Amino acid sequence: MKLAISGKGGVGKTTFSALLIRTLSDMGKHVLAIDADPDANLATALGVPDADKITPISEMKKLIYERTEAQPGSIGGFFKLNPKVDDLPDTLSAKMGNIKLMRLGGVKKGGMGCICPESTLLKVLVTHIVLARDEVVVMDMEAGIEHLGRGTAQAVDRLLVVVEPGRRSIETAGHIKKLASEIGLKNIALVGNKIRSERDEEFLKTRVSDLDFLGFLPYDDGLIEADLKGISPFDVESPAKAVIREMIDRL
């Protein structure tokens, strides 16, 4: 099962991703967790030891040079467009129980984007992970789906867009849906987060009536405290954990 998670910054996308990954692991699944959001830290949310010491792949200059035969930061010129990546998930991931975590990092873009060695390596790596790996794959994406190409998107089993009761969150979900349709990614579902009451749930259902909701996570001070303390939301008591299990059953 290959899942991509997206949503506006601040909606709890990484908290949801961490709860999903840890629950799948707890159920005995082998999970390849991909942190594809440079502004988040999925490793900390998962409770991976020494999370702050994990070097993003986009900053591994020696590796990028070895695989693409071009210096990171260079734009244009000649470099391998199909570098070897099949060994990277096993050799470069941080491991915790059934979970392997890879942190992709970001690529600084200028002008019309970046046709550069590091961007190419990351896209080829994501393609390999989605098309060729046999674990459960969960990708915590940016507030978009930049790492997914047309061929990769069609192999993603579900794009889960996290939304909270608020207009900007809903607008971002609409933007993500448009991007997804442009690359042929059709299996999209929403996850409602920070739900305080039935009114919040109803607000989301009426504002986004053209997409199905996988489930709704309650507003929980315990999850916020976990984030503030830098511990995994899975390691605190929360009704959200039971909701996550129900979502996995539906998936």
Image: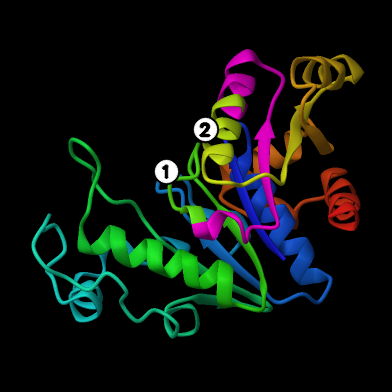
Residue 5 is situated, as x and y percent measured from the top left of the image, at 62, 47
- Left or right? Give the position of 143 relative to 163: left
Residue 246 is situated, as x and y percent measured from the top left of the image, at 91, 51
Q: Quadrant of residue 8?
A: top right
Q: Amino acid at mark 1?
A: Asp
Residue 244 numbered mark, or none: none
For the residue labelled by badge 1, is the local secondary structure a helix, a strand or a loop? loop
Q: Residue at x 70, y 57 (%)?
A: 157
Residue carrying label 1: 39
Q: Residues within 10 Å of mark 1 (few under 14, many from 20)?
A: few
Q: Quadrant of residue 67?
A: bottom left
Mark-to-mark CA distance, 1 and 2: 9 Å
Residue carrying label 2: 9
Q: Residue at x 60, y 25 (%)?
A: 174
Q: Quick check: is 152 in the magenta stretch?
A: yes
Q: Residues within 10 Å of mark 2 (few under 14, many from 20)?
A: some
Instruction: Name the foreground residue: 177 vs 199.
Output: 177
- Left or right? Give the position of 122 relative to 65: right
Position of residue 146 relative to residue 213, above or below, is below
Q: Are marks 1 and 2 in contact (CB under 8 Å)?
A: yes
Position of residue 84 relative to residue 201, above or below, is below
Q: Residue at x 53, y 71 (%)?
A: 129
Specify the segment rendered in magenta: 151-173
Q: Amino acid at mark 2?
A: Gly
Residue 82 is situated, as x and y percent measured from the top left of the image, at 32, 74
Residue 15 is situated, as x and y percent measured from the top left of the image, at 65, 46
